[in-house]
Amino acid sequence: MTEHPAGPGDRAGNPGSISVPATLDIDPLLDDAATRIIVCCGSGGVGKTTTAAALGVRAAERGRRVVVLTIDPARRLAQSLGLTELDNVPRRVAGVGEAAGGELHAMMLDMKRTFDETVEAHADPERARAILENPFYQSLSAGFAGTQEYMAMEKLGQLRSGDTWDLIVVDTPPSRSALDFLDAPKRLGSFLDGKLIRLLTAPAKAGGKAGLKVVSLGMAGLSMFTGALNKLLGAGLLRDVQTFVAAMDTMFGGFRTRADATYRLLQAPGTAFLVVAAPERDALREAAYFVERLAAEHMPLAGLVLNRMHGSGAASLSAGRALAAAENLEEGCIVDRGSGKEDLSAPTAGAPGSHVQPADGGRPDTDDGSPTAQASSPGTEPATDGADSPARADGGPERLLAAGLLRLHAERMRLLERERRTRDRFTALHPEVPVAEVGALPGDVHDVSGLRTIGERLAGREPPPAE
């Protein structure tokens, strides 16, 4: 695309005057042995899961042992990698990375199973069994608010704790809550240090009747609250909660310690966050939120991946010029077919020097042996004298087809200009964020071959598709 030094683009639709942001170079990021975690975050419907999978494929085929962890419960990752299912255990993707000595594995966070594994790993068998069988724990581990974020931190910490993986690619949920796991240590600490938890742990710490008296007095002020919860979750709620808290008491400190450690890991130089967006106003507004939030949390942002950018193989032909050419062709077809409005001031058909076709579709009369007369004889083509000469009437369909293609091109150029303007508004607000643009594909990505193509475009190794 031709670049011009100034201006946001002319009124005719020429996008060439738009500035180019700093380029995000993906391959050095994937090849760097110091890069151990890449977190992909972004709003829904922008290709975040596809981007995470494509990064995993490309890294594996460049010789790294990679696991892609998705927190998003959608099944698209498994489908695109050719796996029948994904669960809490990494599954190897066949045919990816072997030639370069790499491997690709994929998994999907199972919140409850991760919680169960954490209990089993950090409690003795008897205590672990008591916790796992507790009704309150079963409700908590299956869908209590914030549990997914806690368990995402736990799972990431587990994957990173050893040297099994060269690179962990995390695909987060498709919403602003994708960054809620950054708050997990803080929320967990607030929960564990809260008055209610201290009150519920009082019986175990005080022991005997004195402890029960403390609980009885402490819960008196919450009788209405607990009464409502008992009606909602069952008459034995308070007893189940007390039993759960007593069993988990020795584990609470470990939860907090591990969550804090994982949070620090996300801030470390070996982690890179990639914000994924589409060239649309709402998606880039969400991307700006992610960028600002990551900066506030001192998280290492690698850059922005801008998916589904459109390109053109004829970008030098602006929308305005394409529309003007289409109109000229369409008007020419109207005259050639002998229908529509006629210019009465033009020379009459058959007059000397006239280039107007007779109304009956015949050829103009000539009175000499010039080439024009010879070309008018049956079986020969009429002579032309440049761009101003008339087209044959039977050229109408071809002209209309060409005009239609020109109008399609004009629409593409307008779309391209709109995407560039939207991108430039983001880069003007965040000039420090490098951008990797990924050209739009004609269809959805549903296999490893498509993921390879996305990886090539992420790395800038393949140009955006032409019209």
Image (cartoon, helix red, strand yellow):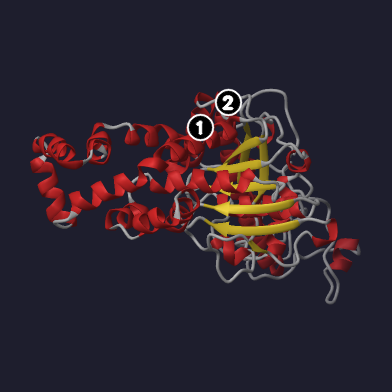
- Residue 206 in the image, given as x and y percentages of width and height: 23, 36
Residue at 73 percent of width and 28 percent of height = 4
Label 1 near label 2: C-beta < 8 Å?
yes
Point out which mark residue 72 bears. none
- The disc label shown at residue 288, or none: 1
- Name the image quarter holding the C terminus: bottom right
Asked if one can make out residue 421 in the rendered structure from this viewpoint, the answer is yes
Q: Where does the image place residue 413, in percent across and percent down from the top left?
A: 63, 45
Q: Residues within 10 Å of mark 1 (few under 14, many from 20)?
A: many
Q: Is residue 120 left or right of residue 360?
A: left
Q: Quadrant of the N terminus?
A: top right
User: Among all residues in the image, which is located at the extreme bottom?
Assistant: 379
Q: Quadrant of residue 359?
A: bottom right
The residue indicated by pointer 2 is 430
Q: Amino acid at mark 2?
A: His
Residue 169: x and y, percent?
A: 63, 48
Work out whether residue 389 or residue 46 is closer to the camera in this orientation and state it: 46
Mark 1: secondary structure: helix
Check disc 2 and report its element: helix, strand or loop: loop
